[in-house]
Image (spheres, rainbow, N blue to C red):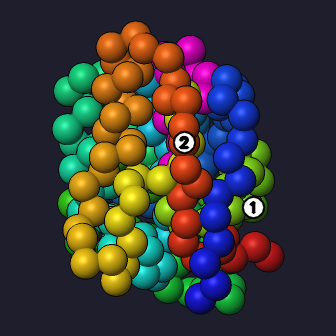
Amino acid sequence: MALTESTMIDIGTQAPDFSLLDTVSGNTLTYTDVSGQAGTLVFFICNHCPYVLYVMDELIAVANDYKLKGIGTVAISTNDVVRYPVDSPDNMTAFAKKYDFSFPYLYDEEQTAGRAYDAACTPDLYLFDAEGKLFYRGRLDGNRPGSGREPDGTDLRNALDDLLAGRLSPEKQYPSAGCGIKWK
């Protein structure tokens, strides 16, 4: 799988809305439904990407740690399930249960959310402030599979702390990297 970096859309970009099936609850959810009082994390992930699997436990830990601080979290899979059936909604449901997601896992069948967010890879991470303005985009941390270090979420956690403390968006932000989105 070719390593792909995120596109790094402009800080301050308004969070695109969506209306997608939550494979956990069976409900259709919008950005407003998943947003938190203090901000919102949007994770573009999938079930099979080795980069996602490498960071999954830490992504869940970050979501759980910041939920009590008013941060909403949602995961979205936008991959083409015809070519990658492991990423189908049924498999997404099983994946969310296996990892005990405390947040929705949405299926982007038409790939409209992925395109609206300019998602490029899995994982691709976005943090929006309480008004839905992009505060941080990029990597979880500097650790990668084969680096000899476990994911610790340093970059994302620092951005979350800055947001909650009312500080400016981190000046230096690094792209996330992983498998490219599987477009139709």
Look at mark 1 in the image and give the residue it sits on. 110
Point out residue 65 in the picture as x, y percentages from the top left corner: 20, 38
**Residue located 33% across and 77% down the image:** 147
Residue 7 can be seen in this image: yes
- Position of the C terminus, as image quadrant, is bottom right
> Is the C-beta separation of discs 2 and 1 under 8 Å?
no
Q: Within the image, what quadrant is residue 98 found in?
A: bottom left
**Residue located 22% across and 42% down the image:** 64
Mark 2 belongs to which amino acid? Gln
Look at mark 2 in the image and give the residue it sits on. 173
For mark 2, does the 10 Å Cα neighbourhood hold few (<14), some (14 to 19), or many (20 or more) residues?
Answer: some
- Position of the N terminus, as image quadrant, is bottom right
**Residue located 73% across and 60% down the image:** 111
Range shown magenta: 124-134
Q: How many marks?
A: 2
- Chief secondary structure of the magenta portion: strand
Magenta stretch: residue 131 in it? yes
Hey, which residue is sitting farthest top in the picture? Answer: 166
For mark 1, does the 10 Å Cα neighbourhood hold few (<14), some (14 to 19), or many (20 or more) residues?
Answer: some
